[in-house]
Image (tube, rainbow, N blue to C red):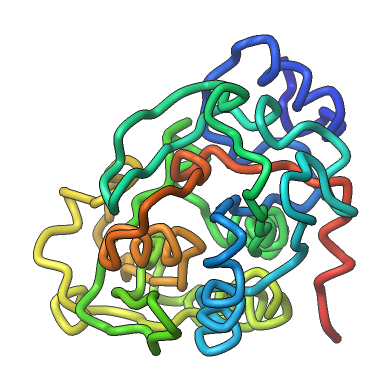
Amino acid sequence: MDVAALTPERARSHFREGLRTPTAGWCRGWTQANLLAVPRELAYDLLLFAQRNPVACPVLDVGDPGAVSTALFGGDLRTDLPAYRVYEDGRAVADVGDVRDAWRDDLVAFLLGCSFTFEDALLRAGVPVRHIEAGTNVPMYLTSIACRPAGSLGGPLVVSMRPVPASLVPAAVRVTARYPAVHGAPVHVGDPGEIGIADLGVPDFGDPVEVRTGEIPVFWACGVTPQAAVMASGVSFAIGHLPGHMAITDARDDRFQVP
């Protein structure tokens, strides 16, 4: 199956039928998004948290309370992602392929920008994307950088990492800076220890990837950041995507590209 050539609707049907897989490289040209659904009484705090931390939490769409689709996502948010993570009292209590039984009428779904959206542009610019080459999930790390808190929410910045040949780092920065709604330019280049990452081989989410001789680790803000805030803040209940297993929307990538 050529997953890059699939339409969002067809991809979502595969996930609804039980396919569980990271979505990097899927549906070329279509925007992918992070999902976090929180109780209505927490929705303002999450919106304010996103406004205060826009690089990590760029809001693409927000649903009505209880709604299972949004303007950008025509499928069913309870079934049409490949995998979900359920939180209770700040702890991940289940990783599942379907959250119909867990979904509540008071949940407000947020769709936030995902860096998978600019990976096709990186590839077209000649910048390798190692996790796509390897067929694995992108590595993601908790950092020592604190986000600006909002109401009851606070926590660390999460980053994704892609190894980039040193000569191509300027190209990677230039390409991704044109996608501010999906995290934009890197937040850090080089020594992971400077942002509190002790071992690139042990990501907090996703899979490790090889960093080859002559390559530099490049870090982008990651939309798992609000899930880290859910954990750090002890939120009573929330549903997110399993990191790397995204919502594939009906929006085109170029909608979020700036000149």
Numbered label tally: 0
Residue at screen point 27% across, 83% down: 145
Residue 112 or residue 164, whichever sits in front: 112
**What x and y, as percent, mark residue 214?**
29, 66
The one nearer the camera, 145 or 25, is 145
Image position of 109 with respect to 58: above or below: above
Give coordinates of residue 167: x percent, y percent. 45, 76
Determine whether, in the image, residue 28 is placed left or right of residue 51.
Answer: right
The residue shown at (38%, 67%) is 159
User: Residue 79 or 24: which is nearer the viewer?
Assistant: 79
Give the residue displayed 65% in from the left and 82% down from the top.
Answer: 177
| Quadrant in which the N terminus is drawn | top right
Task: Pick the residue in front: 151 or 144.
Answer: 151
For residue 126, say whether it is visible. Answer: no
Q: Could one spot residue 100 in this view of the protein?
A: yes
* Extreme residue in the top direction: 17
Q: List x then y, in percent, for residue 156.
A: 29, 74
Q: Relative to residue 72, is residue 23 depicted above or below?
A: above
**Location of the C terminus (image quadrant):** bottom right
Residue 3, given in percent of the width and then of the height, sits at 72, 26
Q: Write down the quadrant of residue 66 in the picture.
A: top right
Image-based side of 104 in relation to 56, left or right = right
